Amino acid sequence: MANIRKIIEEKKIIAVLTIDNAKDAVPVANALKAGGVTAIELTLRTPAALEAIRRIRGEVEGVTVAAGTVLKPEQVKQVVEAGADFAVSPGINPRVVKAAQDAGLFFGPGIMTPSEIEMALELDCTLLKFFPAGTTGGLKHLNAMAAPYKHLGVKFIPLGGITCANVKEILSDKLIAGVGGSWLAKPDVINSGNFAEIERLAREVTEVIKG
Ligand SMILES: O=C[C@H](O)COP(=O)(O)O
Ligand SMILES: CC(=O)C(=O)O
């Protein structure tokens, strides 16, 4: 299994996509890549998601592809078959985490309470989504909540309310491995075929992080 934690720490930004038409997957991935964003999460919220993972995996080199919103154990097999590099979920379901571990698929469950962090640690997960980050107190809340677990090497990927305006501050926190966000490629922008706008947003965040 690739070292997903290291990859996320290097790439820093995960573009979270909810895609309606699988035909858009490759142009969107290429636009993100041209702008410097090479980690992409396809949420399993639309029927096109699995085919989108398959197409990006098959046609776009150098991009790390995750499956998001993986809510059922049986979806693990589907995302492995589609070629996902890792998978995440908004919350934590031990049956899904165990199915992923049995399949050799790296899994980052979502948490927003200490009890959920403890459940994740019990399942040997130390890279966790912090969702929904923006409305549950952001970094201040995360640092207070995670204080008892820092010595265990746990790291977080906040998702929810991340934009170009707050990304740099969030990434500067030692608890953060990377961030996820949908602002880079919103469904209406994807559906309108405005891939140039997606590339522009990806380039903008890449420059903000570098600068
Ligand atoms: O469900 C997850 C969200 O779509 C990601 O949060 P965001 O839209 O605030 O980036
Ligand atoms: C929110 C999130 O992490 C997911 O849909 O997988």
Image (tube, rainbow, N blue to C red):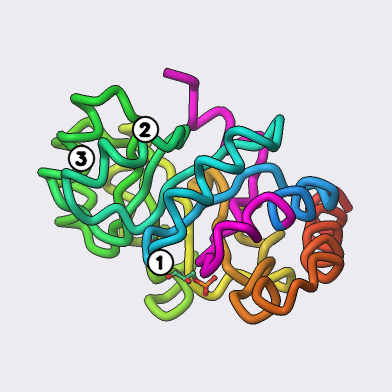
Q: What separation in Å lies between label 3 and label 2 (alpha carbons)? A: 17 Å
Callout 2: SS: helix
Give the foreground label among 3 and 2.
Answer: 2
Give the amino acid at mark 1.
Thr
Q: Position of residue 51 (x, y in %)?
A: 48, 49
Q: What separation in Å lies between label 1 and label 2 (alpha carbons)? A: 17 Å
Labelled pair 1, 3 in contact (Cβ < 8 Å): no
Labelled pair 3, 2 in contact (Cβ < 8 Å): no
Is 7 left, or right, of 199 in this rendering?
A: left
Q: Position of residue 156 (x, y in %)?
A: 44, 49
Q: What crowding class fits label 1: few (fewer than 14 Cα within 10 Å), some (14-19), or many (20 or more)?
A: few
Is 85 left, or right, of 27 in this rendering?
A: left
Q: Note whether 162 is above or below 79 in the view shown.
A: below
Callout 3: SS: helix
Residue drawn at point x = 58 percent, y = 31 percent: 7
Q: What separation in Å lies between label 1 and label 3 (alpha carbons)? A: 21 Å
Quarter of the rendering containing residue 153: top left
Earlier in the chain: of badge 1 and badge 2, it is 1
Labelled pair 1, 2 in contact (Cβ < 8 Å): no
- In this rendering, the count of numbered labels is 3
> In front here: 188 or 182?
188
What is the magenta range? 1-27
| Residue that carries the numbered disc 1 in the rendered image | 46
Q: Which mark is residue 97?
A: 3
Give the amino acid at mark 3.
Val
Q: Position of residue 136 (x, y in %)?
A: 37, 76
Quarter of the rendering containing residue 133: bottom left
| Residue that carries the numbered disc 2 in the rendered image | 81
Earlier in the chain: of badge 1 and badge 3, it is 1
- The magenta stretch spans residue 17: yes
Give the amino acid at mark 2.
Glu
